[in-house]
Image: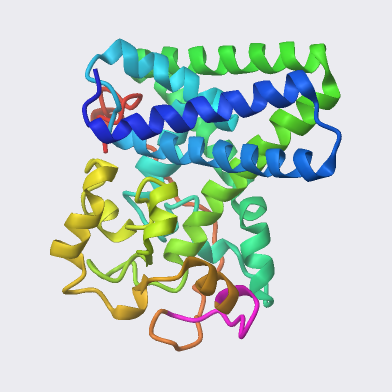
Amino acid sequence: MLRYRADVKTLIFVTIYFALVAVQWVYAPHHLALAIPLLVLTCWFSFFGAVATHNTVHSPVFKARWMNRAFQVVLTLTYGHPVSAYVPGHNLSHHKHTQSYRDVMRTSKARYSWHFLNGLLFMSKVGKDIFFADMRYFKAMYGRNRPWFRQMILEAVVFVASMGVLLALDWKKFLLYVLIPHQYAAWGIITMNLLQHDGTDEKSEWNGSRNFVGKMVNWWTYNNGYHTIHHIEPGLHWSLLPDEHAKRVAPHIHPNLDQQNFPAYLFRTFFWPGKRTMYTGEPLVLPPAGPDEEWIPAPSETPSDVSLGAIA
């Protein structure tokens, strides 16, 4: 059933997320020594669901199309957003027009002088633009790509209905065990764009992305620390990224763009010295702020299927 055996991990992580929510919903632990770790784990596994969403819109998990469609509905419930809606802003805007005015997630939208705020509030700087761009894309696809549009509607309807039921059953549990983890997952997956692209050279084949190559962070995040090779070949399955990075990227990339220690990078970047720089060490000079440019494909360029990663 699986295209790659490695996606057994994907299925296990998704199962763990639902198990964590179910356990807390049923037992509602009151002791902080148990309640806080469980909530933190739920946030993490909701984020892992967002990473799995990223993976599956590039490289489907299952061989059968109907199973991929069903799995997208399941993944929608793990991080709180229709999976198909991930495609426009990520695959078609960010991947095709990285860091340009056609990239709705370009890092130059975050312009605080205190770089810590750029990391903390990046989602708030790009979220509105992503939403309205998605709405325009949905409207365009209604007439151009009905299969994708129907899949997106299915995911949205199941999600809204499920959230409505949980909210009606117990709004406090819904807020704590569902909404907060979903918000963390959305914040985390969007903020990763800042970490991987801010201060890089989008015009360079090798130096346009920052990689986090430590084994621990990549074990948990399905090797998504290997970002340069992902931009070179987006449809490459996540289990193949480390070897391909070593063969095709590592010999050419600037050494500062292969970060071994993810927590240490976060500390240096946002706390001490906390300066916003290019990967070469010079201060980052932001391009002029400007509006998003149109990136929605013309009718003749519209992919035939954008729901199962076929356009990656």
Rendered location of residue 295, percent (x, y):
39, 44
Q: Is residue 177 above or below residue 196?
A: above
| Residue 144: quadrant of the picture | top left
Asked whether residue 130 is in view, the answer is yes
178 left or right of 66 in image: right
Q: Quadrant of the C terminus?
A: top left
Figure colour scheme = rainbow
Q: Is residue 152 above or below residue 55?
A: above
Rendered location of residue 149, percent (x, y):
42, 17
Q: How many marks?
A: 0
Q: Main secondary structure of the magenta part?
A: loop
Q: Which residues are magenta?
A: 269-278
Residue at image x 83%, y 21%? Answer: 171
**117, 21: nearer the viewer:** 21
Residue occupying the far bottom of the picture: 282
Q: Quadrant of the N terminus?
A: top left
Residue occupying the far left of the picture: 247
> Does the magenta-highlighted stretch encompass residue 270?
yes
Residue at image x 30%, y 37%? Answer: 58
**44, 307: nearer the viewer:** 44
Residue at image x 40%, y 27%? Answer: 11
Rendered location of residue 79, percent (x, y):
57, 32
Rendered location of residue 195, percent (x, y):
49, 63
Residue at image x 51%, y 31%? Answer: 136
254 left or right of 90 in image: left
292 left or right of 258 in image: right
**130, 226: nearer the viewer:** 226
Q: Is residue 126 above or below residue 38?
A: below
